[in-house]
Amino acid sequence: MRGKIPLVSCAVAAVLGVAAGVQPEIRTAVATAEEGPTTRERLVAAFADQTWPTPRPGSWTPARPAPDGLPPVIRRINTQEKVVFLTIDDGYEYDAEFVEIVRREKVPILTFLTSTYVKGYGQYFWALRNAGSQMENHTVSHPNLAGLALEGQKKQICGASDTIAQQYGRRPQILRPPFGSMNEITRQAARDCGIKSILMWTSEFYNGTTSPSGVHNQFVHGDGGTNVIKPGDVILMHYRKGLAADFRWILQQIRQAGFRPAAVENYLPRSLGGNAPDPAPKPAG
């Protein structure tokens, strides 16, 4: 069910969106209050796009393209650094306090956006984009992709990429299949839609819901352990009610374990949709 965004959240997110210099409908809505170059310059300076540290040379092993030319499925980042990667899916709850935390704490996150939630709330995700989160592909309406034929999967994946590109100025290059459900047709559809890699996860923080064992807000590692953090973990969360408080909790756990959040895109080669240089080809033979 789609969450309802409080009026104050709309106002804060709209101001953050204006700082990006986009979203015509937002600019129109706040033009009277925010006119004047001095105010605009202050906003742009305050909410400038974030950049994130790159990995230390030799500290990680980049993923490589799949031999069959289709987008590879990446399940973890192979690194020796004590870093983890926070990824947040869907988009049906809108929490301005969460945006403020991401901005203030300078935390890299990656959003896998279900594009149907953009309608009416595009400014919220503009605020997150300016806080440093790329918008990647989580389909149009969150179906089980494995249950769809090729054309149905392409409609879901290409449609989401089209909306996100139009709204946020960058076409997604990374896909996360809803529920983690996919098949070989998904890889074909993803390639046809311009997707370069498919990113899964190693652990899930069941924020705002209960884990399979019935525990509310439980952190569960893919190997079955709880409250265990490992280098290169890709942590799955969702845009749900209470995200700001839950995000503070997971940040505390990460930092107490001696880890820090890092930007996924800086650990993925450009050929797979990231920002890192592509590794040298393996020698023949």
Image (spheres, helix red, strand yellow):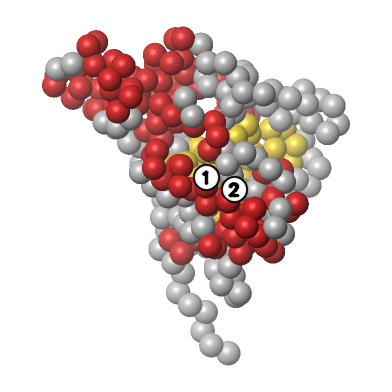
Mark 1 Cα-neighbour bin, 10 Å: few <14, some 14–19, many ≥20:
many
Instruction: Spot the residue most to the front.
Output: 151
Q: Position of residue 207 (x, y in %)?
A: 68, 26
Above or below 29: residue 269: below
Within the image, what quadrant is residue 235 found in?
top right
Tell whether 138 sits left or right of 97. right
Marker disc for residue 160:
1
Q: Residue at x 52, y 79 (%)?
A: 282
Comparing 136 with 103, the one in front is 136
Within the image, what quadrant is residue 21 found in?
top left
Instruction: Spot the residue most to the bottom.
Output: 285
Mark 2 Cα-neighbour bin, 10 Å: few <14, some 14–19, many ≥20:
many
Q: Amino acid at mark 2?
A: Gln
Please name the residue that numbered disc 2 is placed on.
156
Q: Residue at x 53, y 88 (%)?
A: 284
Above or below 276: residue 204: above
Q: Position of residue 262 (x, y in %)?
A: 49, 43
Q: Position of residue 249 (x, y in %)?
A: 62, 23
Tell whether 169 sits left or right of 111. left
Within the image, what quadrant is residue 25 found in?
top left
Q: Amino acid at mark 1?
A: Ala
Marker disc for residue 50:
none
Q: Residue at x 31, y 16 (%)?
A: 29
Q: Secondary structure at mark 2?
A: helix
Is the residue under label 1 in contact with that under label 2 (CB below 8 Å)? Answer: yes
Q: Position of residue 122 (x, y in %)?
A: 44, 29
Residue 132 visible? The answer is no
